[in-house]
Image (cartoon, grey):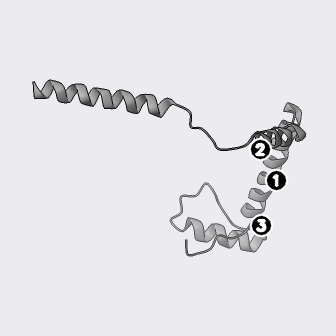
Amino acid sequence: MKSFAIKRIMLGVSVVALVAGTMPLALAQGSTDAAAQQGAAASTPKPTKAERKEARKQARAKKNAELKKLEEAGYQPSQNDPNYPDKLQAAQKKAGVGAAAPASQ
C-alpha cells in the first residue's frame, strides 16, 4: 500500500513539474520597453537574399585569398602535422595575415 501511495505522489510531482516547465515565464517589462524594441527592429531592414548571397561571396573570396597567402608563406593545410598551431602561427606572422593566437590558452 505504501508503494502505491509513493508512486501516486511521485506521479503528481512529475505532472506538476512538467506543466510548470512548459509555462512561459512572465517577464517584468513595461509596455514602453516592448514598443521601443519593436521600433528598433523595424528600423533595421532585413537584408535581401541577393544581399546575403553577395556577402557570402565576399567572405568566401576573402577567406580564399587569406588561405592562398598562408600557403605561399609555407603553410600546408592538407598535411597531418603534430606541430599544427605553431606552423600556422608562423605562416600568419610571415604573411601578415590574421592575428596569431596567444600561445598560452
Q: Give above or below for 35 relative to 82.
A: above
- How crowded pointer 3 is (Cα within 10 Å; few <14, some 14-19, many 20+) is rated as some
Residue under numbered circle 1: 62
Nearer the N terminus, badge 3 or badge 1?
Answer: 1
Pointer 3 or 2: first along the chain: 2
Q: Looking at the image, which is closer to me, 75 or 63?
A: 63
- Dot 1 surroundings within 10 Å: few (below 14), some, or many (20 or more)? few
Q: Mark 3 — residue?
A: 97
Instruction: Name the element at disc 1.
Output: helix
Q: From this view, report whether residue 62 is shown above or below residue 100.
A: above
Residue 66 % position (x, y): 78, 58
Rendered location of residue 65, percent (x, y): 81, 55
Q: Secondary structure at mark 3?
A: loop
First of labels 1, 2 by sequence position: 2
Q: Nearer the viewer, mark 1 or mark 2?
A: 2
Q: Residue at x 65, y 60 (%)?
A: 76
What amino acid is found at the position of numbered circle 1 in the picture? Lys
Amino acid type at circle 2 is Asp
Residue at 52 percent across and 31 percent down: it is 23
Secondary structure under tag 2 reads helix
**Towards the viewer: 101 or 41:** 41
Residue extending farthest to the left is: 1
Residue position marked by numbered label 2 in the rendering: 33
Foreground residue, 101 or 95?
Answer: 101
Whether residue 91 sits left or right of residue 59 in the image: it is: left
Give how far apart the Cα atoms at labels 1 and 2 are.
40 Å
Residue 46 locus on image (x, y percent): 85, 36
Residue 85 is drawn in which quadrant?
bottom right
- Amino acid beneath label 3: Val
Q: How many marks?
A: 3
